[in-house]
Image (cartoon, helix red, strand yellow):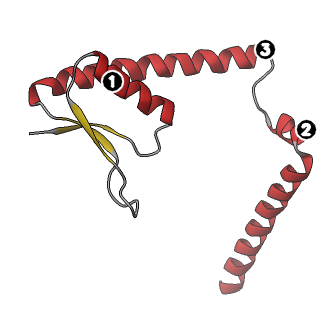
């Protein structure tokens, strides 16, 4: 009987590829389910053999921990070199887009609060 080991909802493609490669490298028999034509099914990776479930989960857990540590290190490196995206750098890169988005947010908040206070 198969077992769910990794959900693919909102998972970056590079991470999904890495997990597939990890399972292939360790000779773990698995299959995938997609979200289906309407996107209502659960995309996931399933292990076919019950005796491989624990091994697969450990491998994925170790991979996720390494990925997390790498992401933290990348963030610190960008921050230390002044390359981390900030509100100011977003504005400087695309000021018109920034102002349009900011204006839309303010308009939505204004209209939301206006209608709330009119109803009260």
**Residue in the picture at 75% in, 14% down:** 80
Q: Nearer the viewer, residue 92 or 117?
A: 92
**Residue denoted by label 2:** 92
**Residue denoted by label 1:** 60
Q: Earlier in the sequence, mark 1 or mark 3?
A: 1
Q: Residues within 10 Å of mark 2 (few under 14, many from 20)?
A: few
In the rendered image of this protein, does residue 45 appear above or below residue 96? above
Image quadrant occupied by the C terminus: bottom right
37 sits left or right of 32 in the view? right
89 sits left or right of 13 in the view? right
Which element carries disc 3, helix, strand or loop?
A: loop
Q: Position of residue 54 (x, y in %)?
A: 18, 24
Which element carries disc 2, helix, strand or loop?
A: helix
Mark linked to residue 2: none
Image quadrant occupied by the N terminus: top left
42 sits left or right of 87 in the view? left
In the rendered image of this protein, does residue 29 appear above or below residue 27? below
Mark linked to residue 81: 3
């Amino acid at each position: 009987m198969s077992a769910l080991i990794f959900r693919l909802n909102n998972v970056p493609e590079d991470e999904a590829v890495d997990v597939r490669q990890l399972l292939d490298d360790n000779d773990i028999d698995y299959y995938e389910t997609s979200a289906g034509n309407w996107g209502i099914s659960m995309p996931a990776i399933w292990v076919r053999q019950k005796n491989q479930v624990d091994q697969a989960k450990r491998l994925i857990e170790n991979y996720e921990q390494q990925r997390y540590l790498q992401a933290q290190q990348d963030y610190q490196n960008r921050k230390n070199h002044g390359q981390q995206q900030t509100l100011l750098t977003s504005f400087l890169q695309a000021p018109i887009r920034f102002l349009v988005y900011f204006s839309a947010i303010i308009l939505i908040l204004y209209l939301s609060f206006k209608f709330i206070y009119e109803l009260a």
